[in-house]
Image (cartoon, rainbow, N blue to C red):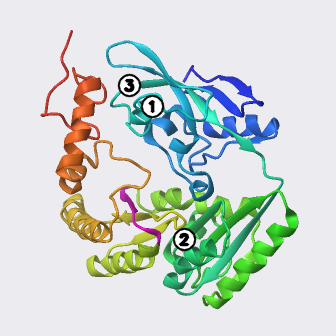
Amino acid sequence: ERMNKILEIDKDNMVCVSEAGVTTSVLQDAVQKEGLFYGGDPCSGDSCFIGGNVATNAGGNRAVKYGVTRDQVMGMEVVTPTGEVVTLGGKFRKNATGYMLMHLFIGSEGTLGIITKVYLKLVALPKYQQDLLVVFDNLDDAIALTPKVMNAGITPVCVEFMDNASIKQVEVFLDEKLPKSENGNYIIIQIAGDNEDVLMDQCEKIVELAEDNNAIDSLVADPAVIWKSRKAYLEADRARSLVFSMEDIVVPMTEIPGAVQQISRLGEKYNVAMHCAGHCGDGNVHIDILKDDRTQEEWEEMLPKIQGEIYALVYKLGGRLSGEHGIGYKREALLEKYTDPVELKMMKAVKKALDPKNIMNPGKVVSINDEVPVEE
């Protein structure tokens, strides 16, 4: 927490050098004042640290256009489990000098080393931005809009969706009326660029595609209102049910409608509230399974059954069990169950090679022979 300094904003090389304890929103504001833009944008940006973003390969809303955290990192300083300090990468944008070790640490969740400094890629700040809210009374039609927009030659910054149950829950949490909430499902699209005329043409094209896909309304959204609603999704569910399971699947973009449709049926099958929202521009779907007033015994019996059906479907569709939230301790057994044995063996080999005494987050992501940390 004390490593909270932005060390340099290099405008010429378009790089920001930051200590690991700088929050994402603070960094975004700092580079924006210099006329630059940082593409990483997890929904927890007001509280999450840059070092944590790198360690978890955080995703977020802007991944459609700018990619996830991995795509923003040019270099890092790492303290290894053996106590050495190494800088991997730097201010350069291309590197073919041996193995790209830096990428092993991105998304490693603190199991391979401690990230202390990060070199982040910056881009020019777009001059214009437009946020659209497209409302559908059919969730399949809503999600199916995304590939049509992207195939029209439009690269949105964000394409987010919220199902009707999520919208109604957010209304309760914020105590605010949201547009068409009676039966609406939301697609939130943000586009940005340097040519206002091109941006307006893209808006018109999106509205046209939405109407062709049975949208019941298309609105120019107030970004403060609509993004507040989208980012309140998790807290709204937490306010209703302190205990809930937050699933984080990812499937090919074209498989989202079928996946969400089949997963929604599980809510009816098990008589449980399941709210869906996420990033349909990159195939990442968040599913909150709410415990509500069930007993702990009922919850522990039901949840694995639902998860088993979800993951069997996801892997059948060519997806994976986590798009951006990672594995941690909670999903370590699931990773063991669903990952290709060869891939899993490679992961464990990396862990053993870099952390031979198993002192960095032992048991997180992968377990290496159930070893316990070795004391010096």
Q: Secondary structure at mark 1?
A: helix
Marker disc for residue 110: none
| Quadrant showing the C terminus | top left
Q: Amino acid at mark 3?
A: Gly
Which residue position holds label 2? 162
Which residue position holds label 3? 113
The crowding category of the residue bearing disc 2, from other C-alpha atoms within 10 Å (few below 14, some 14 to 19, many at least 20), is: many
Range covered by the magenta-colored residues: 243-253
Q: Nearer the viewer, residue 81 or 306?
A: 81
Q: Amino acid at mark 2?
A: Met
Marker disc for residue 102: 1
Nearer the viewer's eye, disc 3 or disc 2? 3
Q: Is residue 294 visible?
A: no
Marks 1 and 3, how far apart at CA: 11 Å
User: Residue 99, relative to residue 148: is it above or below?
Assistant: above
Q: Residue drawn at (65%, 22%), measured in percent from left and top?
A: 5
**Of callouts 3 and 2, the N-terminal one:** 3
Which x, y percent locates residue 212? 64, 90
